[in-house]
Amino acid sequence: MSNQESAPSLGSWFELLFQDISYGARMLRKSPGLSLVIVISLAIGIGANTAIFSVTNALLLKPLSFPDPDRLAILWLRSPGIGIDQDWPSPGQFNDIKTQSSSFEELALAIGRSANLTGLNQPERVQVVQCTYSLLHMLGAKASLGRSFLPDEDVPGKPSTALLAYGTWARLYGSDPNVVGRSLVLNGNSYTIVGVLEPKFKLDREVMATVGGLDTAEIFTSMPLTAALLQRRGDENYNIMARVKPGVTMRQAQADVDVIAARIRKDDQRDATFTISVVPLLEQVVGNVRQTILVLLGAVALVLLIACANVANLLLVRTSSRQKEIAIRASLGASWTRIIRQLLTESVLLGILGGVAGLAIAAAALYLVRVINPGNIPRLDDIAIDGRVLTFTLSISILTGIIFGIGPALRIANVDLNSALKQGGRNSGGSGLAIKNDVLRSLLVIAEVALSLMLLVGAGLLIRSFIRIQSVPPGFNTDHMISMRVSLAGPKYNGQPKATAQFYDQFSEKLRNLPGVKGQGEVTALPLTPSVGWGGLEVEGYVPPPNAPEIQGDQRIVSPDYFQTMEIPLKKGSFFSESDTMDSPPVIIVDEKMANQFWPNGDAVGKRVRFGGPDSKWYIVIGVVGTVKQYGLDADTRIVSYFSSKEAPSNTMYVVARTSIEPSSVANSMVSLIHSIEPDAPVYDVSTMDRRLTNSLARKQFSTLMLGAFAIFALILASIGVYAVLSYMVTQSTRDIGIRIALGAQQGGILKLVIGQGMTLAVIGEVLGLVGALLLSRVMSSLLYGTSVTDMVTFTGVSALLIAVALFACYVPARRAMRINPMLALRFE
């Protein structure tokens, strides 16, 4: 017969496959307990991988929902020499790039700001993006009502127009279809509403962060490109978004911009480190969490490998008990190829069942992530179990079924038919325990222990790092503190500093008399909020080194009582007083970091600093206060200069109050006080300082909890693996142990023998795991704070924990071995 004739037809192949699946399902039902343990182990590993892959798919694999997203980029200024790694460009720099670059098809200029929306039932604080036509055009924004911006709205002299985000239209205008053509007033300026954007048009928070640091965009307004605007070179508060031309790579665009940045450095006498970076939009969106996601992806891969090793060990136990069945099938003519295929079919069935259960675990995990919303996952709404995720889960389920099934299947192929038929596969004795000759099972246990140690060390380092961060003093007392932001706008306050100062004076007086309030103050940039403010400065008498960059520092305006209310300690000199007004000599307070940098001998008080160039006035330092963690407990702080609000009032301020009662209980009273003085003043961003501190740690806390959970899963799986192997070892070695006891072996000797076998594997696994952990910790270095990648406390503690768990897993079967009755064991054999 020819090969073609002997080859099975497609119908026969499906028939054989159906037979294998049916037989495999029956065999799984015969041992439901073991099958359930295997499915649960796989569900943990596959479910964790599916959940993290869903995040990876949404963040790193799925394109942004804009036209040609791979051609979109954000342009940033960078001046590492003065401590600024990312800064917004100016309209003048936008004009330079627009007129000199040959790499971009479109360029858009935008700036974000919060504004007071008046004319409705009550004042609202809204987030506004003023932009050129190209921004919304590049992002594919379309109007569901009215129209979007037109190109000629960039032309000077055109009426000011506005577009409403769909949610803003529904929330503030009740989805009124007649809203187009109406006027809205932002900070006292009138705009004509020309349209409402489609509900599907949404900008990620990470995209919005590039536009003035906003969280979202509620209103878009037009930006005429006047000659005066395009000549503003020092106003570096704008955003530039670009679309590269077809066929132009981001690297080519960067080279083009580098030439322009060199001209700007020369013409504007910028620092030698000044550059302009072209950052792909997707990288901008996911860049701050990419490494965290990749570390978690690696962690769940280790969990799955541990689960596979564990299941392979359990299947080795199962197939060993089926040696007689397999031997009978082989004796009756079944080929080893058919037998191996049957065993692999059973393994793949288990893998698919684990995958189905894993999908349910992944769906529940993603639901919890959305509920918790730690604030560090961009594009959270895009994270879902879609077709790509289902394909991934199916593929990984089949692959794991093959991986953990191939070892036991090949192992059974080497069975001795005569021995199996005579003894049913039971160990016939020997000079040692069964595990001595079971290299495959031993290697699997070693692998489980090694991988578990790697995960435990990674989780331990993150936990140590998180504890270190929590112990960092913020520089102020968050206890019983309520905070909120107030913004004054309109003709009454714009350009009227005395009116602004009068408002805050009245409010402060009323707030001090509010029951439960112990102290109050105001500041322009409250710690642990997105608010920022910095600029260049000159220190009298300080001669910078040759070619040194410009000195940059944070600048904040505070009320006289702010430091006492926040409990920021005074190190030298005095706080501001009520007499430090616009009519008195200009004074400032500096933080300890600035004082140590420029006056290390402790004589900062009385020194002079000026801001804004050689024609600006000098400020006298009257005090030095403690350093405050402005941007997070794990973030470096810039030097800080504080100005008195009596001398330089600001329209927008954070109001803080320390209370003797629950701080949130006085929030409504504070808002009512503000509106009693100025009904049109929006009040927003209301929160306790304890909550702000907690939120600032949410990202690291979430990453730590995730990796910690994976490490616990790994530890459980590894302990189950060690226990299963030693339990099987004791069962298979019953005759050997019975003979030893009959010959006079003591129980302590049996205990030592069994535990020694298991702990030998555990120690080998720990040694290999320590090597892997050293490599893993270096990958995680950027996620750690104040913790060495070779932290001895973590490595020692984790090693001891794993040894203790392995010892317990060894002890249970060892105790069973000690109780073996030699007469019963020998009679059974």
Image (cartoon, rainbow, N blue to C red):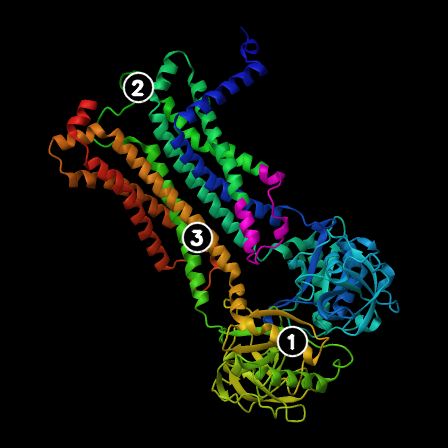
Which residue in the structure is indicated by mark 1?
672
- Which quadrant does the C terminus fall into? top left
Residue 306, image quadrant: top left
Residue 282 on the magenta segment: no
**Local crowd size for mark 3, using a 10 Å CA cut-off: few (<14), some (14–19), many (≥20):** many
Residue 420: which numbered mark, if any?
2
Is 266 in front, or is 128?
128
From what the image shows, is residue 588 above or below residue 325? below
Q: Which badge, 1 or 3, comes first in the chain's sequence?
A: 1
Which residue in the structure is indicated by mark 3?
708
Q: What stretch is highlighted in magenta?
A: 364-390
At numbered mark 3, what does the secondary structure look like: helix, strand or loop?
A: helix
The disc labelled 1 sits on which kind of residue? Ser
From what the image shows, is residue 652 above or below residue 253? below
Q: Which of marks 1 and 3 is in front?
A: 1
Q: Which badge, 1 or 2, comes first in the chain's sequence?
A: 2
**Local crowd size for mark 1, using a 10 Å CA cut-off: few (<14), some (14–19), many (≥20):** few
Residue 451, image quadrant: top left
Q: How far apart are marks 1 and 3 (CA)?
A: 45 Å
From what the image shows, is residue 664 above or below residue 699? below
Q: How far apart are marks 3 and 2 (CA)?
A: 45 Å
